[in-house]
Image (spheres, rainbow, N blue to C red):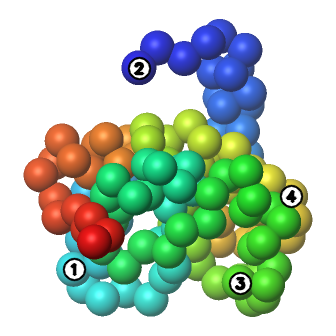
């Protein structure tokens, strides 16, 4: 997907301040049973078509508003993902600005997860 240049500029700016991981590392950590929250930041319609196992849904449009009630521990590790890693980078940047110390964006996002052939959960 080709993103507009100004959107890409703010995403690249956010990436200079955040922690990132990749699809393979997240998969390995899930397989090991590591303790972290996996947060899908995509839109409702995207979530409904499929998401990563064990993920919770807090869309990019509301994450800054809702995160404190859902994740009050500012040091809780959270791996955020979206379609490709851009919206989750923006969300991780904002959560970091709010004081969360372990808000990590998954580069590659849901598309990368699918390309790797990993399990996807579809709500019934």
Which residue is at the far left? 117
Q: Which of pointers 3 and 1 indicates the residue nearer the eye? A: 3
Residue position marked by numbered label 4 in the rendering? 97
Q: Secondary structure at mark 1?
A: helix
Disc 4 secondary structure class: helix
Neighbour tally class for label 3: few under 14, some 14-19, many 20 plus, Cα within 10 Å: some
* Contact between labelled residues 4 and 2, with CB atoms less than 8 Å apart: no
Label 4 Cα crowd, 10 Å radius (few <14 / some 14-19 / many 20+): few
| Of the image marks 2 and 3, the number of the one nearer the N terminus | 2
The alpha-carbon separation of the residues under discs 2 and 1 comes to 29 Å
User: Which quadrant does the N terminus fall into?
Assistant: top left
Q: In the picture shown, does residue 70 fall above or below 3?
A: below
The residue at which mark 1 appears reads as 31
Give whichever of discs 2 and 4 has the lower sequence position.
Answer: 2
Circle nearer the N terminus (4, 3) = 3
Q: Which residue is under mark 2?
A: 1
Q: Which mark is residue 71?
A: 3
Crowding at mark 2 (Cα within 10 Å: few <14, some 14-19, many 20+): few
Q: Is residue 124 above or below residue 87?
A: below
Which residue is found at the position 65% from the left and 28% from the top?
12
């Amino acid at each position: 997907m080709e993103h507009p240049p100004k959107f890409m500029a703010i995403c690249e700016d956010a990436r200079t301040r955040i922690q990132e991981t990749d699809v393979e590392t997240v998969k390995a950590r899930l397989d090991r049973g590591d303790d972290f929250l996996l947060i899908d930041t995509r839109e409702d319609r995207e979530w409904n078509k499929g998401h990563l196992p064990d993920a919770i849904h807090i869309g990019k449009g509301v994450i800054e508003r809702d995160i404190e009630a859902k994740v009050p521990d500012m040091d809780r590790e959270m791996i955020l993902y979206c379609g490709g890693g851009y919206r989750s980078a923006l969300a991780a940047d904002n959560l970091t600005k709010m004081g969360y110390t372990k808000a990590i964006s998954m580069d590659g996002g849901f598309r990368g997860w699918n390309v790797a052939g990993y399990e996807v959960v579809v709500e019934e």
